[in-house]
Image (cartoon, coloured by chain):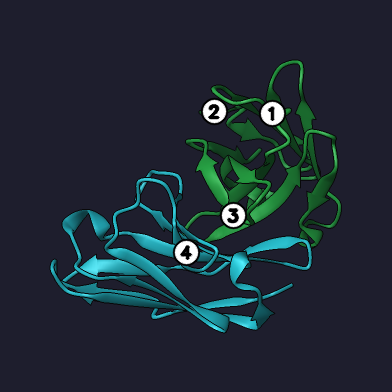
Chain colours: A cyan, B green
Amino acid sequence: EILLTQSPVSLSLSPGERATLSCRTSETIGNGYLAWYQQKPGQAPRLLIYGASSRAADIPDRFSGSGSGTDFTLTISRLETEDFAIYYCQCYGRSTYTFGQGTKLEIK
Amino acid sequence: QLKESGPGLVRPSETLSLTCSVSGDSISSIHHYWGWVRQLPGKGLQWLGTSYFNRNTYYNPSLSGRVTVSVDTSMNQLSLSLSSVTAADTGVYYCARRRNSAYDFDYWGQGALVTVSS
C-alpha cells in the first residue's frame, strides 16, 4: 500500500493569504494518480484537483495543484472564508486508493 | 446524484449492508466505476471497494475479505456488505463515482452514518 503523508497537520491563516499544503507519497506515482479534496463539517468530500494539476468542474482558479514523483502541492492563492476546511490528498497505486490523513485549514 | 440508504445501527459480528441509489446517470455506463469510501470518527477517509458495470470489482486488501461491492443494473444501484463488524467499523459510509479516464472520485453521496453497537 502506498502511504501518503500530508503536512502540515493544521494551518492557521487569514482570508486573503496564500495557503500551501503538501502531500508526500511513500513511492513514486504517476501524475495522473494524485487528487485533492476539500471536506467541510457534515459534508462529503468535494473533488478539487485531479491528475495532480487539473481543476475539477466548477472549482475556482484560486485552487491549483502541482508536483510530481513523490511530492505534490495544493495551493490556494487568496483564501476566502469558505476555503477553511479539511483538505485530503488521494492517490491510486497497486490497484488501491489511499487517502492522506488531512490538513485542517483554520481561520487565524 | 448518489444517495446511500440502510440501517443506521448494526450489532457486532453481524453484516453491515448499504445501498446507493444512482440518479441522473447510469450505473451501466462504460465511463464510470462506482465505489464505497468510509470515514471513521475523527479520522480520515478509507477506500473500501470499487465495481464496474461488468461486475469487475476491486477491494481494499486491508479489510481481509470482509467487503463485498456489487452493482444492480436493473435498479441502478450499488450495494455494500461488510461482514463481522465491530465497533471499529462505526462511521460514515459514502458511495462515490470514479470516471473511467481518471483515478479519483468526482461525485459523492451525502453519506450514511452507521453505528455498530449491541
Q: CA distance from mark 2 to mark 1?
A: 13 Å
Query: From this viewpoint, is residue B6 visible?
Result: no
Q: CA distance from mark 1 to mark 3?
A: 17 Å
> Could you tell me residue A84's position as x and y percent?
26, 60
For disc 3, the neighbor class at 10 Å (few under 14, some 14 to 19, many from 20) is many
Chain of the residue under the numbered disc 3 shown in the image: B
Three-letter amino acid code of the residue under disc 3: Asp
Q: Residue at x 70, y 31 (%)?
A: B29
Q: Nearer the viewer, mark 3 or mark 4?
A: 3
Q: CA distance from mark 3 to mark 4?
A: 12 Å
Is B75 left, or right, of A13 in this rendering? right
Q: Quadrant of the C terminus of chain A?
A: bottom left
Q: Is residue B96 above or below residue B27?
A: below
Q: Which residue is mark 1?
A: B27
Q: Which mark is residue B111?
A: none
Q: Nearer the viewer, mark 1 or mark 4?
A: 1
Q: Which residue is mark 4?
A: A88
For disc 4, the neighbor class at 10 Å (few under 14, some 14 to 19, many from 20) is many
Q: Which residue is mark 2?
A: B3
Give the mark nearest the N terminus, 1 or 3. Answer: 1
Q: Which one is nearer the viewer's eye here, A38 or A32?
A: A32
Is B78 left, or right, of A82 in this rendering? right
Q: Residue at x 62, y 48 (%)?
A: B37
Q: Which residue is mark 3?
A: B104
Chain of the residue under the numbered disc 1 shown in the image: B
